[in-house]
Image: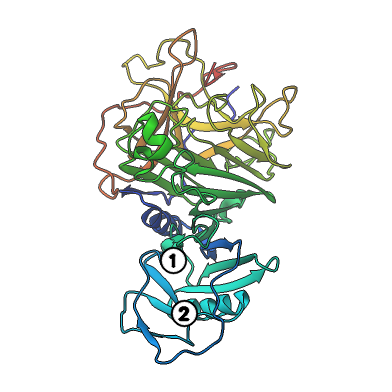
Amino acid sequence: MLIDSLDIKFSGNVRNKRIGGPNQIKFINEWKTLLQSVGWTKTAGLHASVSVTFPLGTPVTDGIEVLPKTVIGCSAPPGFITIGAVQYTLFDPYKQVPGTSLACVFVAMDTTYGGTLDNLVAAINDVSGWFATVTQNTSVNFTLDLVAVPDGPEFNEILVTSAGFLSGSAVSSGGGYTMRSSSADFTAVYDCSMTSADREGAGDNYLAGILKFDFSLNGDHVVYQLLNDDQGTKGFMGALGVGAVSEYIVIANPHGFSVVDAPRDATTHQFRAISLFCMAPYFPVAGVDVPDSEVFVPTYAVFIVGPNNIGDAPCWNNPNMAPSSWTLGDGLFQTDGFNPMPRVLAYRSPTLPLQTIYSVPIYGCAYVQFGNLGEETDHAFVVGKLWDCAVVSDFIGLDGCVLDAKQFLVLGYGGGTDGQTVTTFLMACGLPGRSSLPPIGQSSRCASAPGNPGEGAFGNSGH
């Protein structure tokens, strides 16, 4: 028997943003602003940092004064050390006098390695947006640590180089923000930190995405990374010929968000991380949403669809993509083969669309199910409804459609071959006329779910 009206569960606060030319500064700042606008809270500002090593010490002075002193200019780039656009040049205070050039910062050498680096630290702290410290590892080996004074992404991707004194170069990372989902409506609360990923010293490591999402779910962490605006044209990604990501569409509500590329590419890409989806489901309330006899037990439940499963069937277990992650009142689990991964329910409709007698597709809410043990032998529970999401028993064009007077964007397709259920998975992106997206229009008119489909009306969206 039917236990629910299958109405879409609307949060009442869903918005979207097109982020064109999504470099890490622009993406992180606009992502933060969008999430704040729908009820997420900034809990921390994250500071960019970078560390470099002087493996064999530094130049020093012998401490013997020679007169007259020589006036010197800036060393050829990158000088003793360059941090972003700021170059530091060493001079011997016993024999040399800095010139008037403003192209570099002059740093006095000392009679010891540590003394020279102490002078460098003082110069960095005096003229830049970094807080510098130095650690002595051995008699000749030193580490210089830099932490950006302001939080946020503006000091990410800063290159640190030198003229042979450092053990390679390094790029700063880690600046951004930690956002917390809304605690309203009794859904699980989780954190997501948005930063620029550490390239681990490799300036051309473009295979892994720079846009780093660090989720904290029930005390556990899981990290996903997406490409920025130019990674697809450089390094490993350029060799694969995947192309740049010109634009992202981010849709957010108080309990989750989605990131997809624009113009929307509905196909999946094993080597091109361009999509992400996360949500804390809503638990239907007995006596309000469902009969008293039907009890959805509230527990801590959040799931993340890793790159690049969004775009394919909403049965997120593609072994060639990044694993999806979830927690259901327990620790963090990830997909491995065909264990009880997150997936949505759909009306069982093998191969053919399911429509009314007026040739209008049937649609309803998006119930999600997943297990709580993360094992092949575990069974999946119907956890709850996905906020602002819908399932249509037909194929809807990428322009999306209007459901319940609200615009929806397509996030994935499923079925249509080999007896699989025909499914389109969508997420509301804002009311017509109030969205930053171009009008979707009514490319597909859909009928609401029928009054009583009867027992066995649901099928897994992927099978």
Residue 274 in sight: no
| Image point (40%, 64%), residue name | 78
In terms of image quadrants, where is residue 77?
bottom left
Viewer-proximal residue among 252 and 365: 252
Q: Quadrant of the C terminus?
A: top right
Tell me the residue at 46%/79% (across/down): 107
- Seen from the viewer's position, the closer of residues 305 and 136 is 136
- Find the residue positioned furthest to the top: 418
Helix or strand or loop: what does disc 2 sit on? strand
Residue at left 49%, top 68%?
A: 151
In the drawing, does residue 250 fall left or right of residue 290?
left
Which numbered disc covers residue 187? Answer: none
Vertical relation: 398 (above or below) 27: above
**Residue 232: x percent and y percent?**
37, 38
Q: How dense is the environment of label 1, judged by Cα within 10 Å: few (below 14), some, or many (20 and up)?
A: many
Q: CA distance from mark 2 to mark 1?
A: 14 Å
Q: Quadrant of residue 51?
A: bottom right
Q: As drawn, is 269 to the left or to the right of 432?
A: right
Report whether residue 431 is seen: yes
Within-10-Å neighbours for mark 2: few <14, some 14–19, many 20+: many
Foreground mark, 2 or 1, reads 2
Relative vertical location of residue 305 with respect to residue 462 in this rendering, above or below: below
**Residue 83: mark in rendering:** 1
Q: Position of residue 289 (x, y in %)?
A: 57, 39
Image location (x, y in percent) of residue 296 = 67, 37
Please identify the quarter of the rendering in which residue 183 is found.
Answer: bottom right
Q: Which mark is residue 107?
A: 2
